[in-house]
Image (tube, rainbow, N blue to C red):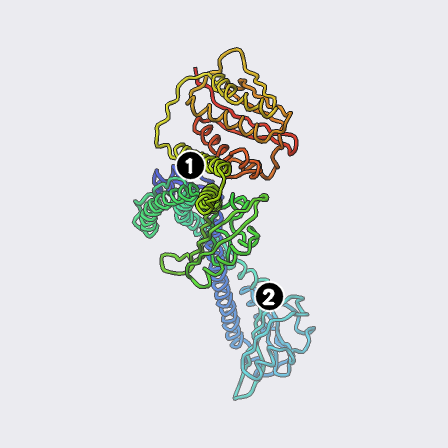
Amino acid sequence: MKSLKLAKAAKELTVSNTEQSDQDIVSRQPSILHSPFLWKLYAGFSALIILSSLGMGSLIARNIEQNTLQSIRNSLYANALLLKEVAFSTLLENKEKDVKLQKQVLFTGREIGTRLTVIRADGVVIADSDKNPEIMDNHAKRPEILEAKSGGIGTATRFSRTTSRYRMYLASSVVSNGQIIGYVRTSLPLTVVDQRLGELRWIVFVTTGMTTLVALLIGLVLSHHIVKPLIVMTSVVEKAAQGEPGEKLSTTRTDELGKLAKAFNQLTEYSQSRMEMLTTDRNKLSVILSGMVEGVVAVNRDERVLHMNEAAGKLLQVTPHKTLERPIWEVVRIREISEILEDAITNETDFQRKLELTIASTKRFIEMHASALHDGNGKLVGAVVVLYDVTKLYQLEAIRRDFVANASHELKTPVTAIRMIVETMIDDETLSPEMQSEFLNRVRNQSLRLSSIINDLLTLSRIESKSEKNVHIPLDLRECIRSAEVLLSPLGEKKSVGMEFDLPDHAVQILGNKQELSEVVNNLLDNALKYSQKGGLIKTFLFERDYKAVIEITDTGIGIATQDQQRIFERFYQVDKARSRESGGTGLGLSIVKHIVLSHGGSIEVESTLGKGSTFRVTLPEPEL
């Protein structure tokens, strides 16, 4: 009952010393009784107390035992001295038997609870308080007698065959004129000794046990008082580690734990502000990297991926979040990327190289810029490579080169022809009027072709530069097609190529420039006539689909090869250059068509089979109502 009251008082003391703010935090945490640290601390404290108590109790019990045994020996020695006085005369006379002595020994031994024995120098027992001396063995060889014979006093603990008990013996020699005339011996049974020692041990055990129990209860209170703030701190640290808003600890205590709580609150505030700053910076960096069109790959010193943005993942055909912490050579099986990163790490400098990739049967050209990464202390931590996709630049450069070459060739041909004809007419004075007339006709045709090329280039430049603001007004597409029908039907009849026009009965309204859209239809029909054989057929359809106007022109001409279908809208690109020149084509018509359609928000596509004909389809958005 005392232990229960003491534990209850300790619990009340602990609660009273704990701040309400700490209680609010701990109430949301596991019970303190489930704390491993509490029980480890308490176990160590308990082990120390128990071992100390056992050690102290053992030392006290041993000391008491030794003192008790010494006290018993002193008591036996005192009794032996008294017995000497009683037995001296008998031993001096060397009597074999003394009835009076036996009675005195018997009476005294019973009164003091000690066995008394008188022994002559030859070992014969002449008096004993417990047994008849006449039937007792000779005691000359007893250990205590032998020890008393040589040293004056002898002690021994052994089993007595006379009394059938373990006893403690003390023998003292009786001397007269320097000669041993006999011995007196006192003894007690060990049961008496053990009884006394047992009582003392019990007292020591009870005292030590009560002291240990009180110490353990006090240790539990102290452990609880120490561990509880640590549990609160651990809870706050765990929440801070998980990114949750930090809670402040109570700083009312003035001991080391109070100072630790105050320092922890300061550390939490500083860490939270730093974390917010780092999070903001990280989010900014993440937004910047994710918004970059260039690919970015960062690795550590072991060439394991630290970061890869979406542009790099798309370019290298990998999933960025699956590449983290993996070796770059395992993620991206492109030797050049691994090499440039390795060189940047090894040499701690910048490198720039070009890379050519084939992705989905398409060549892509990449410029790589790699740099070493250093931390705030200037220590090398890795490298970063930025991937620039310059495929479009390469393509534009190739188109520019082709355009310059084609334009130069197309312009050079009529100019050269005109110059040669003029030089011939100047140098040859014998030319007949008929030949001069033919040469002049050729000059006129070449000059017309040169004029057409220049006009088409100017038109294309005007459309692309958008220097003039295009005014789009509502118009009926049927009018553009009918104008083309009136203009080109006679040419179709001349080439014996049939032309059919399928137009809806109602108006097909769009917002656009009538002149430009008429040029689209004219160019498409003109191309169809150029590449159609005698007896061919050209069909023109106009219809509406999904709120869009569609112009579809189908011919039965020579067709376009698959590899040429993607390039026919390029400047000066001609599938059959000989046929195009014969018909007066400049190679710019389809390029002009494409740019006009795109300027109207539409699209153009081609379907063609070599040797069977082609279908061009123009789709234009209708105005919203």
- Camera-nearest residue between 125 and 370: 370
Q: Quadrant of the C terminus?
A: top left
Report how many numbered discs are placed on residues in the image: 2
- Camera-nearest residue between 600 and 360: 600
Q: Is residue 20 above or below residue 127?
A: above
Who comes first in sequence, dot 1 or dot 2?
Answer: 2
Q: Position of residue 349 (x, y in %)?
A: 41, 61
In front: label 1 or label 2: 1
Say left or right for 408 vs 363.
left
**Residue 400 appearing in the image:** no
Q: Is residue 601 above or below residue 118?
A: above
**Residue 284 appearing in the image:** yes
Query: Quadrant location of residue 23?
Result: top left
In space, the residues marked 1 and 2 are separated at their CA atoms by: 143 Å
Q: Position of residue 550 (x, y in %)?
A: 53, 21
- Amino acid on which disc 1 is placed: Ile
Q: Tell me the number on the disc at residue 599.
A: none
Q: Position of residue 581 (x, y in %)?
A: 53, 37
Does the CB distance between marks 1 and 2 fall below 8 Å? no
For the residue carrying disc 2, how many other residues have a C-alpha within 10 Å: few (<14), some (14-19), or many (20+)?
A: many
For the residue carrying disc 1, how many other residues have a C-alpha within 10 Å: few (<14), some (14-19), or many (20+)?
A: some
Query: Quadrant location of residue 599?
Result: top left
- Amino acid on which disc 2 is placed: Pro
Callout 2: helix, strand or loop? Answer: strand
Q: Position of residue 206 (x, y in %)?
A: 49, 53
- Camera-nearest residue between 207 and 488: 488
Callout 1: helix, strand or loop? Answer: helix
Report the residue marked by disc 1.
454
Name the residue furthest top.
505
Q: Tell me the number on the disc at residue 189.
A: 2
